[in-house]
Amino acid sequence: MLPRICAQRLLFAMALAIAASVAPAATDSDGLRATVKPIAPDVLAPNPSDPASIELIGKYYDSIRQWGEIVAARVQPVPEHPEASYLGKPRNVEDDVRPTCYAAMILGFLSEYQPPGVDVDQADRQRWRESAVRLLRYLTASHVTGGGACVNGQPWGNQWQSAMWARAAGMGGWFLWDHLDGELQLAVARLVEFEADRFPRQPPRTGLRDNTAAEENAWNAQITSLACHMMPFHPRAKAWEEAAIRYMYNSFSVSADAADNTRGDWGRPVKQWVTTVNAHDDFTVENHGLVHVGYLKNTASQLQETMVHPLMAGREPPAAAMHHIRDVFELLIDCMGWDAGPVYFSGTDWKIYHEQTSEVVIYTMLSLLKSDSRAAFLQEKALDALFRQQEAEKGFYNVRRDLEYGGLCATRLIACCLAQGVVDATPEPITADEFDRIAAGTRHLEAGKAVVHRTPSKFASFAWSQKRMALALPRDGTWVIWPHFASYLGIVDGKDSSIRHARLTNIDVDVRPDEFRVSGRLLRCKERDGFGLVQDFFFASPPDDYTVYIERLKTVDDLRLNARETGTIGLEYALGSNSRTLHGPW
């Protein structure tokens, strides 16, 4: 039996041989390469007149370059095939293909982009270009259109989420188009064409409870949007564009859209585009069994990132890319932390919390395309947080220092950088005091079953959907408090207060313009014949800088508790630290 590594090398060698036989070198009988329109020189070498645009481009570029050097140092050749490279693990699944696709896009961008007033060493450009080309050779050969496979012997493509990965690979190929030989140009075009062809013939997904399809529809829109702008002379370009628009409209789709006669893209009313419901009427979304702020932000980020394709092609972005984005932005403002990171008021199961790097694209696009001065303020704050995180983590974007998330962040920063150069019109940001005044107040999210309250110096919330929890953060407190699922209501006998372990029998919510109160009863400690513990709770957030939490526990039938941890507060480490000292009055 062959050793594992030898078997993998043999599999990939066979894969390359198969790919070579399936994809004829430099043969393009269908004229596919001719359908590609190269990126205009002024997109890759902008000359903005606005000093603010020049400064912001420089900031984005510096961050991307830091990440690019991390990636370039970790790209590795395929065993016995130095003409092809990959990043991370050589398998054909999400966590392994995504970093390689991101790397091709990032290094391709760095090799071709010329920021204003920056002297980029040509040797660096060549190094990035050669690395990106090797990554594209691997990605196209191992894709289902290449006839080959990844190093683990399995091809990638035509999978859940593979459209998202393919979009990054396609962007890398588009950046490098004039530097690719005919064979690789054809392979890149086939990859993009294949993944884009999946969506004109399948409807967008719908999902409201527990598993929204908002994010999936948004990432599937990315590949069709790229395809129709990268290959505008393709016979199916119009079908791709229509699919992109449809999937964007069906990302933040709400029930009211079914009757919306507002004129949308292509002169059609919105109701003719929307066939799904993926967000509640208050624009909250659910995934992973909770009302998930992360999926709200990520869907918005993907839709805004998609607008870079028409901007690169000299076209106006479709209205679909902004469908309910302003509504979502208002919700994000209502739960916004002081470092431009929205608070996860219903908790998070992601191992990352400070995600300004991946969501700054929301603020950038709203600032540039809607002249939103609030977004311009958040853009500045997010960039400041981004650079502090990157400095603390030596070029990485989070404490995990993983290649997949870092690649995601850098590709979104590329969209920001490109858009900043194309639009060249940055509005004057409002001040921090003005933003605090705008964001102040309460909001009752009836469908999302939560109340949020922000003041200039405090954020407080209570949630009672799948997860039941309270939060109270001081100003700048996102580096102090972690949104723990059991926050305040706590853990009893090892079980939290979620819908899985406890029954909410009543809830009373009193929301006023500058304060709120929530009280209710939970039945906990589930046993064969019922629940063994009654927990009455009260949480209030007054206008002043404090919150109040009161609880009463009553056992049933003399239940004896093994462990009780209520009044729980999740703690976060300070930036760049792995310890925290608590101090203050007790």
Image (cartoon, grey):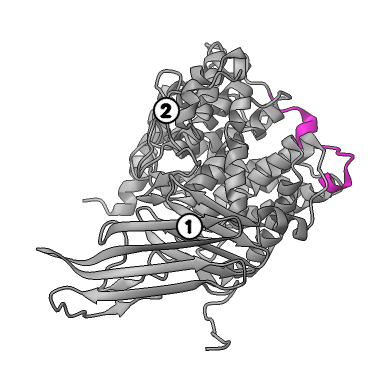
Secondary-structure class at tag 1 = strand
Of badges 1 and 2, nearer the viewer stands 1
Q: CA distance from mark 1 to mark 2?
A: 33 Å
Give x and y (percent) for residue 438. 70, 53
Amino acid identity at mark 2 = Thr
Q: Nearer the viewer, residue 418 or 92?
A: 418
Q: Is residue 73 left or right of residue 191?
A: right
Give x and y (percent) for residue 583. 57, 87
Give x and y (percent) for residue 308. 66, 34
Find residue 510 and name its label.
1
- Tag count: 2
Amino acid identity at mark 1 = Asp
Is residue 183 positioned above or below 453 on the image? above
Q: Nearer the viewer, residue 448 or 270?
A: 448
Secondary-structure class at tag 2 = loop
Instruction: Check disc 2 and report the residue beneath it.
Output: 276
Q: Quadrant of residue 501?
A: bottom left
In primary-sequence order, the first of circles 1 and 2 is 2
Residue depicted at 51% across the width and 23% down the height: 246
Res. 72 visible in picture: no
Q: Are marks 1 and 2 in contact (CB under 8 Å)?
A: no
- Look at the image and give the residue range highlighted in magenta: 38-53
Residue depicted at 45% across the width and 46% down the height: 446
Is residue 341 shown in magenta? Answer: no
Is residue 27 positioned above or below 136 on the image? above
Q: Quadrant of residue 277?
A: top left
Res. 153 visible in picture: yes
Give x and y (percent) for residue 118. 83, 49
Q: Residues within 10 Å of mark 2 (few under 14, many from 20)?
A: many
Is residue 30 positioned above or below 388 on the image? above
